[in-house]
Image (cartoon, helix red, strand yellow):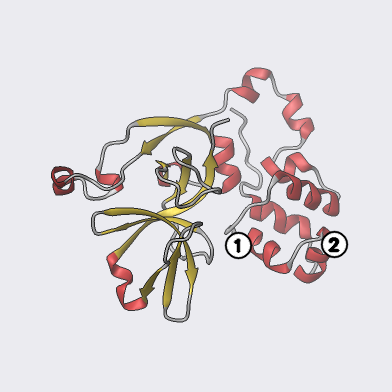
Amino acid sequence: MLENDKIQTFKDRLLESIQGESIPSFAKKCGMSETVIRDYLSGKTYPSLSRLWMIAKSCDTSYNWLATGYSLEEIESNSDEKVYNEKIYRIPVYKKQMPSIEEAKTQKFVRDSPPVMNFPILDGWLSYRGLKPEKVIIYWAKGNLMEPEIKNNNGLIIDTSTRDIVDGGIYLIEYEDMTLLRRINLTINGWLLKTNNDVQPIEVHKSDFAQYKIIGIVVQIIKDI
């Protein structure tokens, strides 16, 4: 595995690339909004490959370095064995929905139930996303309430270390004996839990937050071809 003692996270490499330029000026140069750039710098969101290319071009920096922390020359100078022998983490996969009465006695929550399998994920991808392997799970989505964005049986990579709610983020939530996949919109009085279909949103007042257990935020969707 390539050992990288340089800048480990994308947000730090982006900050170095900005070189002290103001956020409004940098965002304009990249053709993006200030909010998008600030979200990248805070680690809340990460750029798509096309946006990553736009940022690298605007900064006149290496696309490969911005994405991984390595320049193309560094990667090519290593042997194939070093480049491709990257550490692999086995991430637990859960598919729990509404438990049966018997299951609910001992397996009320997703992480109380045994995983159905493990899914291999490369260390490099986790590092790029700023994720800790022990805080990541995969949830096997069921139903069509979040279509077309998330379809039945899509795998969802979920970061369970999240603490602050990101407005508009999609979260895995547990309420009583139900497992919910909902987009959370922040309101003055609390949360609005929404689907992508014509289902009445759930209004959650701040006084009721404790009744809803946030498992984590969806950071990647695994779709079948």
Which residue was labeled with disc 1? 42
Q: Residue 29: which numbered mark, if any? A: 2
Secondary structure under the numbered disc 1 in the rendered image: helix
The quadrant in which the C terminus is found is top right
Q: Farthest front residue?
A: 198
Q: Compared to 173, does 4 lie above or below? A: above
| Rendered location of residue 206, percent (x, y) | 36, 77
Real-space Cα separation, disc 1 to disc 2, in angstroms? 19 Å
| Rendered location of residue 192, percent (x, y) | 44, 70
Q: What residue type is labelled 2?
A: Lys
The quadrant in which the N terminus is found is top right
Near mark 1 (Cα within 10 A), the count class, few <14, some 14-19 or many ≥20, is few
Quarter of the image for residue 114 reads top left
Give the residue drawn at x 32%, y 64%: 212
**Count of labels shown?**
2
Q: What residue type is labelled 1?
A: Ser
